Amino acid sequence: MCISDDPISQAHKEYLEALFDAGLLIPSGVDGVYGRSGVFEDVIERFERYVTKMGQHLDPEVIRFPPVMARQQYECTDHLATFPDLLGSVHSFTGKERDHIALMSKKEAGEDWTSCLQATEVVLAPAACYALYPTATGVLPEHGRLIDLTSFVFRHEPSIDPARMQSFRMREYVKLGSPEQALAHRDYWLQRAEEMLNAVGLKVKKVVANDPFFGRGGRVMAATQREQHLKYELEIPIATGDKPTAIFSANYHMDHFSKTFGIKTMDGNTAHTACVGFGLERIALALFKTHGFEPQEWPEGVRKVLGLC
Amino acid sequence: MHSEKVREILDKNGRLSSPVPDLSDDSDLYSAGLTSLATVSVMLALEDEFDIEIPDNMLSRKTFESISSIVETVNELAE
């Protein structure tokens, strides 16, 4: 990867190095893959508890999926068509002894040993909610379903921007229901999340957004998504004010997932879905950037909301 | 003037749910089943056929919404 010296890359590099120096992130040798310190994790845990508390009155179903999903279910989505460059596919060795010897010889010779591997039944979860839709086939209850999810997700986009990790956590609330229920969910949380983030001192800005669809065809998809106002993000400067980072997104999928997985409302129509997601590492990074590296020294109001005092 | 060729390309790459001969030049191709991925195939086929490159600012839903909008784009780019 080419690391340029433009001011944005420089700001990313500086903030990343400051996080390493403070011990908040631990380098792995791969851009976007880091260990997290106890202090970093504590902030994430506290923020998650805050999210749980603010969603409690809605009585969501809590479901936890592992950070991998079934390849067969993944293939039913159009992720490979729209984000092939972000995919993480899990491969392993399924050969016999002779194949193993060939594999090890390649490794020892410094050759590409991964060609001796075979695809497994799983891929890395591209978003916390992807594993949910295939399990929701059938008819929804009258008021739809509201699901609370959190998971590590993977996106292959190595970057020196500390806020663009390859492996990170996403805390989501997903609504499956009528078009009105799905839209109301998205708009409710968009407002609620803005208030929640303001309450911890993060002055976010609401913007119409698009997903990073692959290639030039992806530009058509992105333009369509923006025209239809399907995705909103709350963004804030993290490493640099020149390029703010989205720390929350609110997405209305219409019948995109429901059509594929046969999710229906009680009146027999195809359901609509919406998901909202808090980018947990990004929120922690925004908090550290805004209030400093010592949570005990953060403003009292912020510490109170996060249960730090 | 490129209408026939555009129709051929759509027939081959558009994976439409309605047969191309049944569509008028102004029919909405998205209603006729044009998906995002098929749009990419159509775009690449148009570029090969007419030896053009559709610039980023024309990569929008509007460009691919009907046979006439595609023909218009091709006419503009294939001088």
Image (cartoon, coloured by chain):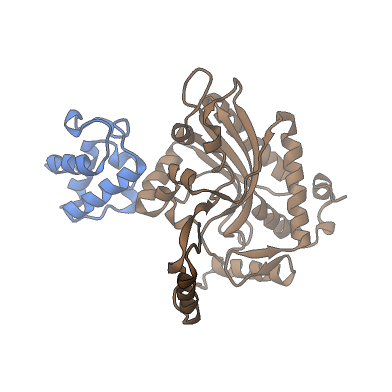
Counting every numbered tag in the picture gives: 0
For residue A295, what is the image quadrant?
bottom right
Q: Is residue B55 left or right of residue A27?
A: left
Chain in blue in the render:
B
Rendered location of residue B59, percent (x, y): 33, 48
Asked whether the viewer can see residue B72, the reply is no
Name the residue at 41% across, 53% down.
A214
Of the pair A86 and A67, the residue shown nearer to us: A67
Measured as percent of width and height from the top left, residue A90 is found at 51, 58
Horizontally, residue B25 falls left or right of residue A167, namely: left
Percent of width and height locating residue B46: 21, 49
> Of A121 and A87, which appears nearest the observer?
A121
Give the x, y percent position of residue B66: 25, 35
User: Which residue is at 40% across, 40% downward?
Assistant: A224
Q: Nearer the viewer, residue A59 or B56?
A: A59
Tint applied to chain A in the drawing: brown
The image quadrant of residue B13 is top left
Left or right: where does residue A30 sit relative to residue A291? left
Question: Is A110 drawn above or below residue A159 in the view shown?
Answer: below
Most distant residue in the front direction? A97
Q: Residue at x 72, y 72 (%)?
A: A21
Q: Is residue A265 visible?
A: yes
